[in-house]
Amino acid sequence: MNYCTLKVRVLELLQSDASRKEGLQLEFKRAEAKVPEDMWETYSAFANTRGGLILLGIDDSGKVQGVQNPERMKGQLENNLHNPSKVSLNLCTDESTLDSIQVGEHVIIAIDVRPAAVNEKPVYINGNMGQSFYRFGSRDFKCSEEQIQQMVRDKSTNCPTGRVIPKTGWECIDSPTWKAYRQRMVSYKFDHPWVELDDKTLLEKLGGYSRDEETGVEGITQAGLLMFGTDDAIRRYFPRYQVNYCEYGDSGQHDFRTRWLDRIYPDGTWAGNLYQFFFRVLPKLTETLKQPFILDENLIAMGETDAHKSVRESLANAIIHADYYGQGGVMISRYPDRIELSNPGTLLVPLEQIRKGGVSVCRNIGLQTMFLRIGIVEKMGSGYDTILRGWLEEGMIPPMLLENNCPARVTCTLPLAAIINREEKQKLQEYIGLERYQNLDSLRRVVLHLITAKGELTSVELGEALAFLPKYRVHETLKDLEKSGYLHACGRASGKTYGLRQKQTESESKDLPSSVILVRKKKRAKAEEMKQAILDLCRDRWMGLLEIAAALDRHPHPLRYTLRLLEAKGNLEFRFPENETHPKQAYRTREKMM
C-alpha cells in the first residue's frame, strides 16, 4: 500500500455513514492532545488477529475531532513503535502505514496495522508477553495463557508433532492400523521405493519415528502416535485429544448433548487414532453427495468426482491443521444441508491469503506427509484450492472458512446446495455451446450460471455472491468474460451490470429476419426499428430476454423497457403474465398483430 492508497482509503471510509462504525478491523480513538494508552492494546489486538486501521482524532460515534499538533504525535508514535519495551514488534514502518491526513478542518492520524505473521506472534506491549491482546467484534481482549502458549507453539521452527516422545516404541502402535496403512501405500503407488522398507525405516521416513539430536533419545513422534497409535497411548500423551463425528437429522445448531442420528468417537471398540477416524468418517460424509463414492478392497477411490475430492481434502485438512493441545478436538458434523469441519487452532496465514491461493503453512507436517504418501491429499499447500475447485466444478454454493479466536478454532462449511440445477446447466451449455462451456474453468462457469439464473447482475451483487473470493479475482473474471464475448456489460465501476451474450456465427445471422440484421449492424437503432426487430424475432416462438439480447447484439437491461412497452400495447405476450420477473420468463408476438 502506498501513501495515496492509505489516504484515499481513509477519506472514502469517512465519507460513508454506513462505514463509520468500529468493528473487527476498525478502531476510533479521540486522542486530541496525546496518544491514549489503550491504543496500544488495540495495536496488539489487530496484530494478533486480522490487522486493522486505527484512526486517532475521531470519537466513538465516528465524529471527526482532530488531533492537536499532529506532527509531534506522529513522532511520539514512531518512537514508541521502535521501542521494544513499548511494543514487541513494529508493524508500521513508513508513510504507507502511518501518516497524518487532512479531513475538512481537522487533521487525524491513521495507523494501518498489518496482521503479524505466525513467526512474529504474539505481539505484546510494555515488555510483557502477558500483555498480548486479540480482537473480537469491536473490542480488545487480553489473551489467555493458553492463547499465548498456542502462538508460541505455532511460531516454533520445529513442528510440535515432530517431537519425540521418550520411552515409546512399537507397543504404542496399533498393528491393524499400521498394516492397513502399508497396504494402502502399496495400492496407491506400488513402485514407490519406500514400499520395500522395513517397518521401522518406513516409519522414520514418514516422520513417525525419530531421534532427538540434543538428548539422543529415540522413540515414536507425536505425529506417529496420533496417526497410528493405540487409544490408551494417545490419551496418555494427549489428554485433550478428541475426534468426533455426528450426523443430525435437521439443520439446526447442536452440541454433543443433542440427540444425533449417528456418531463416531473413540469408544473403546476401535483404536481411536487419526488414520482409523479418517476412513470411518469419509464414507459417512460422501454419502450426502449425489454420485456414490466407493472404495475398493484396497481403499482406493472409484468413480471419484470433484466434490468427493473436496470432502476428502476438507476432512484431511481438519486433521492435519489441528492443534492437538487446544480445546474441543476435531469435530465433524453432517447436516441435511451442509457439512461442517472444525478443528482447534488458528490459521497460520491470513484468511485473505488462503482465499487468494498459493503456498499455505502446515501446523503438522508429519501428518501431512503421512496422508500425502497414500494419496489422500494431492500435494503440499493445495488444500483450500482443491476444496474450492471441487465445489465450483459441481456447481455447488462455495465453501466458507471461518476463524474464531476464543477459543481458537477454524471451521470449514461445505453447503450441500447447488448454485444452479441440472436443467439450467444444460440450458447454459446449449446457449453458449457445449465446447465453449467445457473450455471454461470452474469459476467462470459459476459466474455465468449466476448471471443466467438472475438474467443480469451488477458487479456488487456478483461480489456478494462470490464473497469467498477477493474482489480483484471477481473483477478479473468479469473483465475476461466480457472481453471473450460471453458477457455484455453496461454502466461503470461498481454499478456496472452484466448479462449473458452470445456472438452469432455468420450462417446463423443470415437466418435472422432482415429487421434484426438491421439492428445488429447499427450501434444506435431507432425505437421503431428495435420494436419491429423484437416482434419479428418473437413471431411464432417463445424467446427469453437473454436470447433476444444475443440475437440483437444488445445488453438485456435496456431491452426490458421496450418489452414491457410492447406488452402493454398488446404487441407481445408474456409466458408468465402473473409474474413479470419469473426466472423462465419468455415473450411471443401476439397472433392478432400478425
Image (cartoon, grey):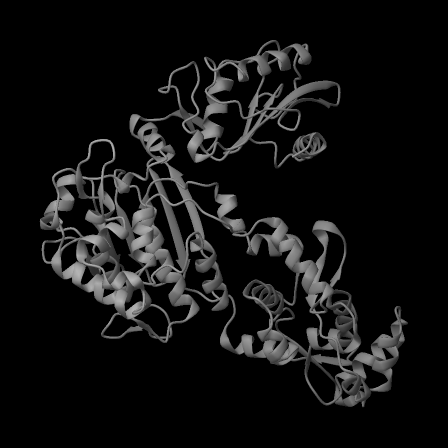
* Relative depth, front residue between 477 and 588: 477
- Examine the rendered structure and indicate whether residue 291 appears above or below residue 360: below
Q: Quadrant of the N terminus?
A: top right
Residue at (39% x, 52% y) in the render: 412
Residue 355 screen position, x and y as percent: 51, 50
Quadrant occupied by the C terminus:
bottom right
Report the front residue among 76 and 52.
76
Task: Name the residue at 28% across, 60% down.
Answer: 194
Image: 213 above or below 402: above
Q: Return the residue nearer the eye: 167 or 549.
A: 167
User: Where's residue 211, x and y in %?
Assistant: 22, 40
Question: In the visual, does 45 lie left or right of 245?
Answer: right
Quick check: 217 above or below 590?
above
Is residue 134 rendered to the left or right of residue 187?
Answer: right
Q: Is residue 253 visible?
A: no
Determine which quarter of the picture holds residue 568.
bottom right
Q: Nearer the viewer, residue 308 or 299?
A: 299
Residue 350, position as x, y percentages in the image: 48, 41
Q: Is residue 214 left or right of residue 561?
A: left
